[in-house]
Amino acid sequence: MTTTTVADRNWEFLLGLLPTDWKELAHTTGAITRLRGFDTEDQLLRALLLHVALGCSLRDTVVVAKAAGWLELSDVALLKKLRQSERWLQALCVGLLRDSELAVPSATLLRMRLIDGTHVKEPGQTGSQWRMHFSLQVPQWSCDYFEVTSSVGAGNGESLCHFPVRSKDCLIADRGYAQAAGIGHVQRKGAYCIVRHNAQNLPVEDEAGATVDVLSWLRGLTQPGAVGRRTAYVRVDRQLLVPVRLCAVRKSPEAVVASQRKLRRRAQKNGAALRAETLEYAQWVIVLTTVPPELLSDTQILEWYRVRWQIELAFKRLKSLAGFGHLPKFDPRSSRAWLYGKLLVALLTEKMQRYAKAFSPWGVRWCDPEASAQFVAGNEILAAAD
């Protein structure tokens, strides 16, 4: 009789969170053309997640997998499998994003791309610091570009300039990308951007060239949920003045309190003085865009930025898992597969949290006969002990 361990039951639970066609996807995407070196699709996935999620080296992964009876592959063969699994891992991420009921506004004539970046550290105390810049195209949720650069030095920070841009692209990014140079880079390519505005780091001008007092304009939005628009210009250099829209929405009182509390904690942690203007700005979400009003309205701009805001949790989890361990920096296919694997782990974590909130915390499903029997047996032992 085969003994089922707690780890095996946990793995079966995890598989139950994947899209229902996850096995078929392994074959249709080309990740598995034949079962060689492993017996089932889940054995390969288990080894890949051991490498991606825990940061085990390829060699350590195959040693553990062989000892557990999952794989009979070399580390070189596992790397090849990782490269072949890029589309499979991407398809699993797309399925989980659909399951999460992530609201995406109706399709537009633009290619909508979510832009983000994260730090990468190689293993060991003296491991090098890197920065990964990546772009996800929605609603396909496919990684259309990534780049690994040094995390230090001029030109290596967060910037839209790192990304290749085509006409009709629309790049959506957080406030770290609200920089005149990046906006100019996108404008020159005939593309657009939607970024969280940082009034202190990115001043905007009116038609006469005077600096716009953004805070005075925002004070007119007094009701929670009130949306306002202000046209302005971003000066990139002497030759380029980019017309922009500022779209703002007033936060709820609860959200304002939470934002201001976060700012105070950050200032206290860094030993910095908190300006009164910074606390006041926390009452609104301000988005800067170069998209013309005839393509996207003010509310559509805010909704599209909200898509990036909604997926921010998954990105944060991706970053929290970013003690990356082995990083195949010189191989685009394996790097993309590794990135999809990281995002898959983040999305699975989010789905497990939703599941835990929706069900009673006894930890088993009643439809599992073995688990139910163990649960009943455990209760009988406790009753006898009492």
Image (cartoon, helix red, strand yellow):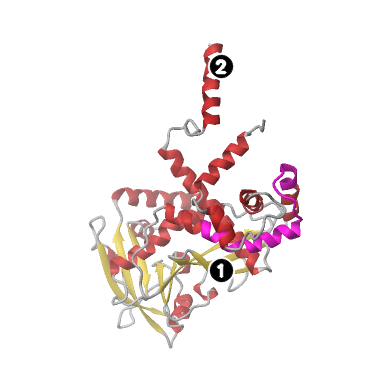
Does residue 132 appear in this view? yes
Q: Residue furthest bottom?
A: 239
Q: Main secondary structure of the magenta part?
A: helix
Name the residue carrying label 2.
381
Q: Which residues are magenta?
A: 64-92
- The percent coordinates of residue 317 (x first, y second) are 52, 52
Q: Nearer the viewer, residue 342 or 142?
A: 142
- State the SS at label 2: helix
Question: In the image, what residue occupies the spot 39% across and 73% down?
Answer: 203
Question: In the image, what residue occupies the spot 56% across and 67% down?
Answer: 133
- The percent coordinates of residue 58 (x first, y second) are 72, 55
Name the residue carrying label 1.
157
Q: Is residue 182 magenta?
A: no
The tag on residue 255 is none
Q: Nearer the viewer, residue 293 or 127?
A: 293
Does residue 319 appear in this view? no
- The percent coordinates of residue 361 (x first, y second) are 46, 32
Q: Amino acid at mark 2?
A: Ile
Q: Which of the 4 image quarters holds residue 242?
A: bottom left
Distance from the alpha carbon under mark 2 to that under mark 1: 60 Å
- The percent coordinates of residue 123 (x first, y second) are 70, 55
Q: Which of the 4 image quarters holds residue 300?
A: bottom left
Counting labels gives 2
Crowd around label 1: few <14 · some 14–19 · many ≥20 (10 Å):
some
Instruction: Name the quarter where the N terminus is drawn.
Output: top right
Q: Amino acid at mark 1?
A: Gly
Q: Is residue 90 magenta?
A: yes
Where 373 falls versus 260 (above or below)? above
Q: Nearer the viewer, residue 91 or 196?
A: 91
Q: Which of the 4 image quarters holds residue 357?
A: top left
The mark closer to the camera, 2 or 1, is: 2
